[in-house]
Amino acid sequence: MNTLILERLQSKVELVEQVGKHLVLSGGKRIRPLLTLACSRLFQEFPGFAIHLAAAVELIHTATLLHDDVVDDSHMRRGEKTANDVWGNNASVLVGDFLFSRAFQLMVETRNLEVLASLSNAAARITEGEVLQLTSAYSLDLSVETYLEIISSKTAALFASACEVGGMIAGMDPMLQNDLYEFGHSLGMMFQIRDDVLDYLAVSFDSGKERGCDFLEGKVTLPVILAYQKGLKTSFWKNHFDGETSNNLSDLKTAVHLLKDNDIFGNCNNIARKYHQKALKSINKFPKTVIWNDLKKLIAYSLNRQS
Amino acid sequence: MNTLILERLQSKVELVEQVGKHLVLSGGKRIRPLLTLACSRLFQEFPGFAIHLAAAVELIHTATLLHDDVVDDSHMRRGEKTANDVWGNNASVLVGDFLFSRAFQLMVETRNLEVLASLSNAAARITEGEVLQLTSAYSLDLSVETYLEIISSKTAALFASACEVGGMIAGMDPMLQNDLYEFGHSLGMMFQIRDDVLDYLAVSFDSGKERGCDFLEGKVTLPVILAYQKGLKTSFWKNHFDGETSNNLSDLKTAVHLLKDNDIFGNCNNIARKYHQKALKSINKFPKTVIWNDLKKLIAYSLNRQS
């Protein structure tokens, strides 16, 4: 799949290739395309075009990262400078569009219309989630319900589709495709909740430029919602999120301690655990192969991962 | 088609709808979707899904406009404030992605894979053209050849595909589909050359905020390339485009007079006329119906339009 992606990043316009490769080669987890590949072979060897489909899923994800980094004005990702930091916002916007188009070209090659429908729906939902985040997630008024709606769109929709299209390309029964969709959705919810916890939990005050972002950008996520609802130092959160957000590392330290000392991360995990149960249930009907076992391990990992 | 577009702009996220409608309702020419519709009925009444396809073409175009306005930092379009001016770059980037996804959803509904292949290829080429423009078009080194390559990608590719998919959805013979592709490509080239001429020719020094953009942004286009190659006041152009570009209206006045007095617009038209001939030739084989006649009128209009 990596080879195929590199092949499709080729362009007669040099900068397109450079920017695309920068992010694709910077070593993400590749969790979404792995899900597509794993789901496609729950019953059989890889069906034809599974790799095309996995590459398309990763390119859609990469396109959204390029655009997210512009929207959030981020300068570091995966330990490296972001594309917008190196080449400017303009190149990131345009190359994101290019990757998105390439993803659709790959999907068209599969000649499977159900796959195209699923992933184009997911792409639309991702952007709706991002816009909802833009308009609602910078205020302490954010409810748990709206938070879950945001992450359901911006993250879980692509996880869900990545799994579902694996089942589609393998020609599975629609009921089983739906189980894979539900599995991916639950996994995506757990994944994003853990991401939002790690943004506080994994803060290192030496090199921690990549964590603590949500706090420093003023983006309200689950740990803050729960702490605020519990009435923990409400004026501290109010000052930070609803006042003039300051890029203040000592405030971040205070926030991390508040969340740790009051077991807010445990409360977040309780919510994640519901999705954990749903995810397990969704793949229960599938044959208990090595791949199935790997999916089970992935569910456990997603609940407690440290990075 | 307008009704269908409005229906598909609906979103549970309010801002998505607002931003989308802002641009879609601001009254563009709708030339690309009209081409799709016209080409689809050169032999017959509208085939099924022609309107879906036309809406998809317009949404792809609108998505690129939203992103272009961010990339060019434009503040006015079609006499109104741009979306990025009103709601910020972030909303424009994300809603552009949303429109692009909606376009793909519409294409998937046609269940025609050739159409999907044609328009996803066009979408990839548009972004390559935009990036090539970003890296090459801000210097007087730009050759006519590279200029033509830029506009072939950023403009003519979508015109070509808009026409081709009209033929595809009507089930035309592949040779005729190819004729429509060539027709659209030539028309797109003429259209963009005229646009670049009008950017100077239609400057009004009273309300002319929307024209003269290329000059004021330092973007080199055909009139400037030809004037510079002719050796007309080379130091004037050098100072403006390769020096510190100043947002200087009196320089713009000088530029317009130089181009007018030396018939540079005429020279541009000579290049456009070659595409005019090619466009006419490409639709020669089609039945001489009312629609065919309209396409011929459109070719003539594109060569001399004043706005």
Image: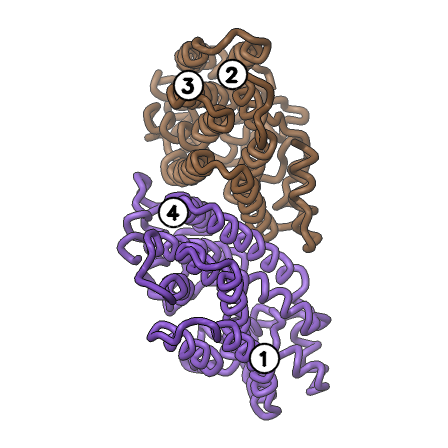
Chain colours: A brown, B purple
- Using the rendered image of the protein, determine whether residue A223 is visible from the camera's viewpoint: no
Residue at image coords 62%, 64%: B150
Secondary element under disc 3, as helix, strand or loop, is helix
Label 4, label 3: how many angstroms apart (C-alpha)? 26 Å
Q: Could you tell me how far apart the alpha carbons at marks 4 and 1 are, in whole angstroms?
A: 35 Å
| Residue at image mark 3 | A176
Q: Nearer the viewer, mark 3 or mark 2?
A: 3
Q: Where is residue A189, by image quadrant?
A: top left
Tell me which residue sits at (50%, 73%) in the image. Answer: B191
Q: Amino acid at mark 1?
A: Lys
Secondary structure at badge 1 equals helix
Q: Which mark is residue B110?
A: 4
Q: Using the image, name the chain to which the residue with label 2 belongs.
A: A
Query: Is the residue marked by circle 3 packed among few (<14), some (14-19), or many (20+) residues within 10 Å?
Result: some
Q: Amino acid at mark 4?
A: Thr
Q: To which residue does mark 2 refer? A: A257
